[in-house]
Structures are given as structure tokens and as C-alpha cells.
Amino acid sequence: MRTTITIPDNTTISGEGCVIRAHDLLIVFELGGSTGVTIKDLIIDGGNTCSRAVAVSAAEANSLTLRDCELRKFRASAFRSSLAVNGLILVDNYVHNIGGEGVVTGFSPNFAYNCEIFGNRIETIGDNAGDWAVYISSAGEQLNIHHNIIQDCIGGIKVSIGSGTQPDATLDANEISTTEQAGIVVGRVTLATVSNNHVIAPRTGINIEATVRSVFIMGGEVTITTDEVGDSFGIILGDGAIDVTIDSVTLRRDNDTYGFGIAMREVDGVLIRNCHIAGFLYPIGQYSSQYLTNVRIEDCRLVGAGSTGAGLSFKYVDGLYASRNIVADVQFFLNLEGTPHVSNTEIAENVIKSYCQNWGRVTGAIAVYIHDNVSYAPIPDDWFDISGNVTLESNTVFP
């Protein structure tokens, strides 16, 4: 049997905590073509045999609310919309023990518009690497995902394929803990804000995928937990990212053996400021051979992983400005290696607080100006390994 209930428009179903056991059904509620439907105060149990609790698959839907429900033990998903939905509210639900994904909606060209997902507790989601607690495949205008608790899920929140000129996505104050994938993934959106989230993930905290524009990552904390050697990222900015701001974020790695605090691929226009990054081999650096342009790093505290790595590490960059940062526990304060691919760069008024083997390497550079930096750590006489057009001025070591 495919479905038990098709709900008329402008209907509220209130279960007062009663239990629907849907062990022999494919879908419990089909809301395709519905408008103004509210489902609340229900416990819906799929018995690990039913595919999903709520679906929008027959026709587009408008103004749907699912609140104060417990959705558990479904094979595929708790809520899934494969067609357009406008005005979806998912609030204060408890979603757990789902074999596929918790909430999935919006498949191009069927966008999810004016949607709010907040106050939900989502636990133990996913059987496979591509499963997410919340997956918005095609984000339309005004998508808000906030104040959710996501625990023990393969992946956290993924949002992509934005549409329109209004803010496509706001992800705020979510508590996320994942077992395999990133805590947050944002890709192909315009004007997205990721703020005040707390993420614990094995290898990647926040992944800003390809072709995003005007993304703001503000506040919050990311902890990377893997104890394996290999690539790991507090935040990674993918190919084609434009105009990204990362402000006042704390990034930590529990096992300080490798990885990047903030890694960049092909990016144009990045401002990183007021961040605290600790325990990564490369607190801020480049993770590709594509060009970076217009990168500013200001007022950050960068603590490395000990006797290796570099506080700032770039190979292909045009227009790098780094100022007033505090750097500690790295082999090199600065590593700029181009052939020649480092140009129009200024490194000014930074402070080295503790262990550092030397100031760093600058090779194959064009128009690099390094001035007024101060070290309070012992540095040998060969402060820099330099080639190319580099100007050093007023840099000081205090023994």
C-alpha cells in the first residue's frame, strides 16, 4: 500500500501524542497538491519497513507545517518533497533512527521557497555516505535553518542550487555532530549566511562548495576529531567561490597531526578576520594549484601543530594582505612558494609569539612587501629564504 492519508486543504491533524504504526505502508501522509495543512502532536513509527512519514510527490504543495511530532524508524526519510514546496515549516520535531535522510526537499527545477526548519532534534540518521540529516537540494528564496540539534548523523546540513536575488539560505545556531561527512555544506547559492553554528565532525566542518557568491560565515565553533593522518578542514572554500567573509569563528583540531584550519581552492575575494584557529598543521592556506585573488587576513590568532607547518601558506595568489595576526607553534610564520605565482602581496604588523623555526620562505615572488612584523620567539639569522621581487622593511626580533 502506498499511502494511508491524503489530507484536504486547510486541515489540521492533531494527534495529541497518539502513535501511528506504519509498518506495512510505503508512505504515511501524501501532501502533494495540498495547501494550508498542519500535522502536529503525532508519533509516527515506520517500524524500519515503511519508506517515509510525509511526502510531497504527487503535485506541488503550499503552506505546510509539521510540528511537535516524533518520526522514527523509516527506511528512506522522515520528510521528502520531490516537487516544489512554498511555505514549509518544520518545528520542534524529534526525528531519529532513519535509514536514509532525515529531511530532504527541493529538487531542481522544483525549488523550496520560504521554508523554515527550526527547533528540531535529529538523531541517528543515515546508512550510506551520501545521507544527510537535512538536505535542501534546490534552495529557493528565504530558506532558514536554525536552532536544530543534529547528533550521530552521517552528514549534517547540505544546501545547494540557490535561486533568486534574495538571501537563499540562513543557517544559524545549529548544534551538529556527524560521524562521516561535513557538518555543513553550502554550494551554488547566492547570499548565504552561516552563523553561530557549533560543529563537531571527523574531517570537514564547513564546506563551501563550487560557485557560491556572497557567503558570510560568522561566529560559532568547529572541532575536527579525526586522529588519522590525511586531509582535514575546519572550513574549505571550493572552486569558484566569490566574496566570502569568515568572521569571529573558532576552529580546533583535537588531534593536531595534519590538516587546514581554513583551506582555499579557486577563490576571488575572501576576508578572514577575528578568527581563532588552533591545532592544524596549516592554520590558513591554499589547497590547490588554482589562483586565489583578493585575500585579506586580519586580526586572527593562528596556533599551529608544533614543529611543522606554516601559519600562512600560499602558492598561487594575486592580492594577499595579512595584517595584525598572532602566529604561534609553526615551523614557518609565512610560506609563499610561487614560480612565479605570488604577486601584489603585503604582510604587515603580524606578531610571532612562540616557537617558530624561521620567518619563512618566499620564492618566485612579484611585488611582495613584508614590513613591521615582530617576533618574540628566537629566530636564526637567516630569517627568510627569499627569491623574486621581495621588499623587507622594519621587521624585528626580540630575543
Image (cartoon, rainbow, N blue to C red):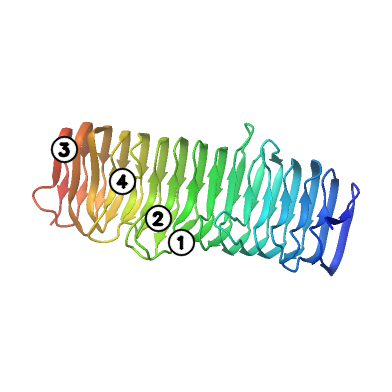
Question: 33 or 48: which is nearer to us?
Answer: 48
**202 relative position to 61: left or right:** left
Spatial separation of the CA atoms under disc 2 and disc 3 = 33 Å
Q: Which of marks 2 and 4 is in front?
A: 2
- Please give the name of the residue rendered at 14% of the width and 44% of the height, measured from the top-left corner: 384
Task: Report crowding for label 4: few under 14, some 14 to 19, many 20 or more residues within 10 A (C-alpha).
Answer: some
Q: Find residue 293 and report its horizontal and vertical position in percent.
A: 36, 33
| Amino acid tagged 2 | Ser
Q: What residue type is labelled 4?
A: Arg
**Quadrant of the rendered structure where residue 54 is?**
bottom right
- Cα separation, mark 2 vs mark 4, equals 26 Å
- Disc 2 packing (10 Å; few <14; some 14–19; many ≥20): many
Q: Residue 392 carries which label?
A: 3
Residue 324 tag number:
4
Tag 2 near tag 1, CB within 8 Å? yes
Structural crowding at the residue carrying mark 3, measured as other residues with C-alpha within 10 Å and reported as few (<14), some (14–19) or many (≥20): few
* Residue 219 position within the rendered picture, expressed as x and y whole percent measured from the top left: 49, 52
Q: Earlier in the sequence, mark 4 or mark 1?
A: 1
Find residue 202 and name its label.
Answer: 1
The numbered disc on residue 238 is none
Using the image, tell me which numbered label, if any, was put on residue 232. Answer: 2
The mark that comes first in sequence, 4 or 3, is 4
What's under tag 3, amino acid-wise? Answer: Leu
Tell me what residue is drawn at x 35 percent, y 47 percent.
299
Q: Is mark 4 on a helix, strand or loop?
A: loop
